[in-house]
Amino acid sequence: MILDRKHFDINNKCAIEKLIIKPPLILDSVFQDEACFTYLKEGELSVTSPTDNLSIQTEESVLLRCGNYFVNAIQKLPAKTCEVFAVHLYPDILKELYKHEFPNFIKDDAIKSYIRKIEKQSVIAHFIQSLDFYFENPHLVTDDLLKLKIKELILLLLQTDNAENIITLFSHLFNPRQAGLFEVVEAHLYSSISIVDLARLTGRSLSTFKRDFETQFSNTPANFIKEKKLEKALELLQSTELSVSEICYEVGFQDTSHFTKTFKQKYNQLPSKYRKK
């Protein structure tokens, strides 16, 4: 549940916002024409992109390029909330800010990562404190001030230990690359993510995702994923000392009895007997 949301807009678009979230809550976020800097002041988040899964702790942040995401606010203690700050980075505003100073700031790039995590940085924490001041005094805020705050954030990021990675990420934040079917499925093969969510991460409806996948791979997504999970389980039975239940969860099954039954259907014997053999 979102308990509170405050935001400042530029040209009728949300530029900077602050959210208080009561976990558990999963937000289905689509940044189609923007990138987003997200800072977690308090709480814990997990962020799922077409190619990544990241856990974000208190005072850590992430840069998200254009794409589809699931942001999960995790509940550790019943009374805890998540406090999140987001700075939305629009191409037109960045081009305006850097058109004379940083001409190569926005360009095409072949790098595939959708997310870049930024560890705790004191300069970023102080920047967030300054945003808090303006949320408490909204009458002081103007479009020019918001643009200056966005530029300040970028300059601070470029001075952190992650500067090289930040420059690389910014160079392709706005390259509208659509993650391929296999790329998304491969990234989440051994997670518990549903077929519906996989479709969303590729920017497709469920029916379109299934149709495109079957056309490309001559197999259904569900069967393809099941086969890959069983192959991985077979490998782990051969090469590790993990228990059958540990392997079950390692490869993304949620129930050991279902895993055992599915394994036997595929390999004509129980996982425990396969290991002994």
Image: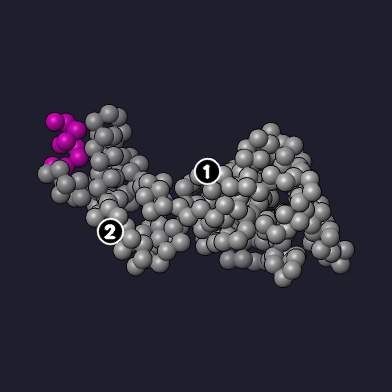
Residue 125 at what x, y percent from top left?
A: 74, 45
Please name the residue shown 24% across and 55% down the image. 218
Instruction: Identify the residue position indicated by label 1 in the image.
Output: 110
The amino acid at mark 1 is Ala
The amino acid at mark 2 is Glu
Assign the C terminus to one quadrant of the image.
top left
118 left or right, relative to 10: left
Please name the residue shown 69% across and 67% down the image. 13
What is the magenta range? 269-277
Query: Tag on residue 135?
Result: none
The reply to whether residue 125 is visible in this rendering is no
Please name the residue shown 73% across and 58% down the image. 93
Residue 244 at what x, y percent from top left?
A: 26, 39
| Residue farthest to the left, as pictured | 268
188 left or right, relative to 133: left
Where 119 falls versus 141 (above or below)?
above
Residue 50 at what x, y percent from top left?
A: 47, 52
Residue 142: in magenta span: no
Please report contact status of discs 1 and 2: CB closer than 8 Å, yes or no: no
Please tell me how crowded label 2 is: few (under 14), some (14-19), or many (20+) other residues with Cα within 10 Å. some
Instruction: Identify the residue position indicated by label 2 in the image.
Output: 214
Residue 167 at what x, y percent from top left?
A: 66, 40
